[in-house]
Image (cartoon, rainbow, N blue to C red):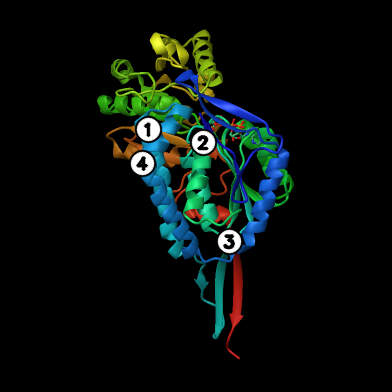
């Protein structure tokens, strides 16, 4: 078992109360993975004070100097990839290849923002009069708060932290209690890369006490949150009350449309990866397949074959392609949703049962589930499940497919499988979604491209990722200079 402490003012410290909590391995709950401080408001206040003290010094450094720290951190992180991926799998449950990919992604994000440090500038504009200069400066906000979920415990902290730090802000991060190890390891890596004390602070513990303080405290100029709509909505209210900048990135109910002309082998492969990969615990996971009736049966057979080929088990073991649900609550939620769908008239076509053979009895394992005959008003068609459960919804035609796809109150990622370029582009125009994938999985993002949802998936004012991620973490000042006299 590892023992972690909070990272405040460059020091590793226990919660002031001395209280701790432990996390167990979702693949084998007999194993305690790590122990963390069960922090309270007083610990959040200490972290905010440390960030306030460090912010002016960090803001006074140049973007290339800050970028060098991020680039160095990228190298250190990459050199520790194998060890951290093991730990990530043991704490969150995703398979080792998935965890290795995620640690690499975090290293790439740090490298990307290290690189663009040389381009972090303002704009020069033509002035109406000769002998005048008109330009903008990008300035940091001061202290920013970050609150992250458990499902990408290193990629999401990295994709918020890197632009925040590059912009010259000091940061207080509150990672999800289910998987805080990676955020604390990132802090270790950044400290080793030369980040000054107090510029990054990480506090673990109860969401309401620590995260709530980050939303309410007037010293926090902006808060970027990724997680559930329920919490994101609450935090946004608190932030808007005090007119602080708010970036809330929340859940999805992501559709993959399969049109009659599609390559059905490709469609089944894409849905199996995007629906069951990462145990369905991705905000961009495919949870609805909206398919033209004429090909529904043929597609279903192929998807069932793909689901049968998935090897469920401990993500550290060779050949395992799907790990456990992250905890008992999520696991029970998945099974409950399958039951609710059946009660509402859906047919369980495949899977959906708990797996208990041998060592599997000690983890939260289930077969990937496929539900058929799902109609647009069923709860399974409207609410995020966040597990390996795919609902197949037959429709008459393309227009109905788009109407069904848009008939939810969220919009994060949306795929289509078709050979018809006109329909693909029409979909890209008409779908209410932040990301559109054509003949690709709904999961998987390019770190250099903007990411964010629409409707209840996001506050939708700033995008994350790509160079535009900097916008949330900076303010623009306009300077008028007259040198004509
Ligand atoms: P969650 O329950 O909303 O928790 C997210 C974070 O908020 C955690 O750090 C949590 O801390 C904290 N928190 C909980 N209650 C709080 C409160 N009252 N005040 C302040 N902070 C509080 O979400 P989750 O279960 O970790 O993550 C799953 C959700 O995230 C899904 O809906 C998924 O779709 C979404 N997600 C979205 C994206 C995206 O980019 N759009 C990406 C990944 C995931 P504790 O852990 O201590 O409770």
Q: Nearer the viewer, mark 4 or mark 1?
A: 1
Q: Residue under circle 1? A: 98
Separation of residues labelled 2 and 3 (CA atoms): 25 Å
**Mark 3 or mark 1: whose residue is earlier in sequence:** 3
Left/right placement of residue 86 relative to residue 341 reads: left
Count of marks, rendered view? 4
Quadrant containing ligand 1 reads top right
Measuring from the top left, give residue 351's x and y in whole percent: 39, 12
- 4 or 1: tag closer to the N-terminus: 1
Pick the front one: 297 or 388: 388
Is residue 91 depicted above or below 103 in this figure?
A: above
- At x 45%, y 11%, the residue is 361
Q: Position of residue 126 (x, y in %)?
A: 51, 76
- Element type at marker 2? helix
Q: Residues within 10 Å of mark 2 (few under 14, many from 20)?
A: many
Q: Which mark is residue 58?
A: 3
User: Residue 16: x and y, percent?
Assistant: 70, 38
Instruction: For marks 4 and 3, give the CA distance.
Output: 45 Å
Please report whichever mark, 4 or 2, sits nearer to the chain's N-terminal start: 2
Residue 181 image label: 2
Instruction: Specify the quadrant of the image occupied by residue 114.
Output: bottom left
Q: What whole-number distance in Å separates the C-alpha atoms at marks 2 and 1?
A: 17 Å
Contact between labelled residues 1 and 3, with CB atoms less than 8 Å apart:
no
Check if mark 2's residue and mark 1's residue have beta carbons within 8 Å.
Answer: no
How dense is the environment of label 4, judged by Cα within 10 Å: few (below 14), some, or many (20 and up)?
A: few
Please give the name of the residue rendered at 42% of the width and 34% of the height, measured from the top-left corner.
414
Q: Residues within 10 Å of mark 3 (few under 14, many from 20)?
A: many
Q: Is residue 229 left or right of residue 87?
A: right
| Most foreground residue, 355 or 459 | 355
């Amino acid at each position: 078992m590892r023992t972690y402490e909070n990272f405040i003012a460059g020091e590793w410290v226990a919660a002031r109360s001395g209280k701790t909590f432990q996390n167990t391995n979702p693949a084998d709950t007999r194993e305690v993975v790590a122990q963390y401080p069960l922090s309270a408001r007083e610990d959040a206040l200490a972290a905010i004070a440390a960030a306030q003290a460090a912010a002016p010094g960090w803001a006074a450094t140049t973007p290339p100097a800050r970028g060098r720290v991020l680039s160095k951190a990228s190298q250190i992180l990459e050199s520790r990839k194998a060890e951290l991926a093991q730990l990530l799998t043991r704490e969150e449950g995703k398979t080792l290849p998935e965890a290795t990919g995620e640690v690499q992604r975090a290293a790439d994000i740090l490298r990307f923002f290290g690189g663009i440090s040389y381009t972090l500038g303002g704009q020069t504009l033509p002035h109406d009069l000769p002998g005048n200069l008109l330009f903008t400066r990008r300035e940091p906000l001061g202290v920013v708060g970050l609150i992250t979920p458990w499902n990408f415990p290193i990629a999401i902290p990295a994709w918020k932290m890197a632009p925040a730090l590059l912009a010259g802000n000091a940061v207080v991060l509150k990672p999800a209690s289910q998987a805080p190890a990676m955020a604390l390891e990132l802090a270790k890596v950044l400290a080793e890369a030369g980040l000054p004390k107090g510029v990054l602070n990480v506090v673990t513990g109860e969401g309401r006490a620590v995260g709530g303080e980050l939303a309410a405290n007037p010293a926090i100029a902006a808060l970027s949150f990724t997680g559930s709509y329920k919490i994101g909505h609450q935090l946004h209210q608190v932030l808007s009350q005090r007119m602080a900048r708010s970036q809330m990135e929340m859940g999805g109910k992501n559709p993959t449309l399969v049109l009659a002309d599609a390559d059905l082998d490709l469609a089944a492969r894409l849905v199996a990866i995007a629906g069951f990969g990462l145990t369905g615990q991705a905000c961009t996971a495919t949870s609805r397949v909206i398919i033209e009736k004429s090909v529904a049966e043929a597609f279903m057979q192929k998807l069932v074959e793909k689901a049968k080929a998935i090897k469920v088990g401990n993500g550290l073991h060779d050949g395992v392609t799907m790990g456990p649900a992250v905890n008992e609550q999520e696991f029970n939620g998945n099974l409950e949703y399958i039951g609710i769908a059946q009660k509402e008239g859906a047919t369980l076509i495949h899977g959906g049962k708990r797996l208990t053979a041998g060592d599997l009895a000690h983890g939260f394992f289930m077969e990937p589930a496929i539900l058929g005959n799902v109609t647009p008003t069923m709860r399974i068609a409207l609410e995020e499940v966040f597990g390996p459960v795919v609902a197949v919804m037959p429709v008459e035609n393309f227009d109905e497919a788009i109407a069904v796809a848009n008939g939810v109150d969220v919009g994060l990622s949306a795929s289509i499988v078709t050979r018809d370029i006109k329909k693909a582009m029409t979909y890209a125009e008409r779908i209410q979604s932040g990301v559109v994938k054509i003949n690709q999985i709904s999961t998987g993002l390019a770190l250099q491209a903007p990411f964010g949802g629409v409707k209840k998936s996001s506050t939708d004012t700033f995008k994350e990722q790509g160079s535009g991620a900097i916008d949330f973490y900076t303010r623009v000042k306009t300077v008028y200079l007259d040198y004509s006299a």
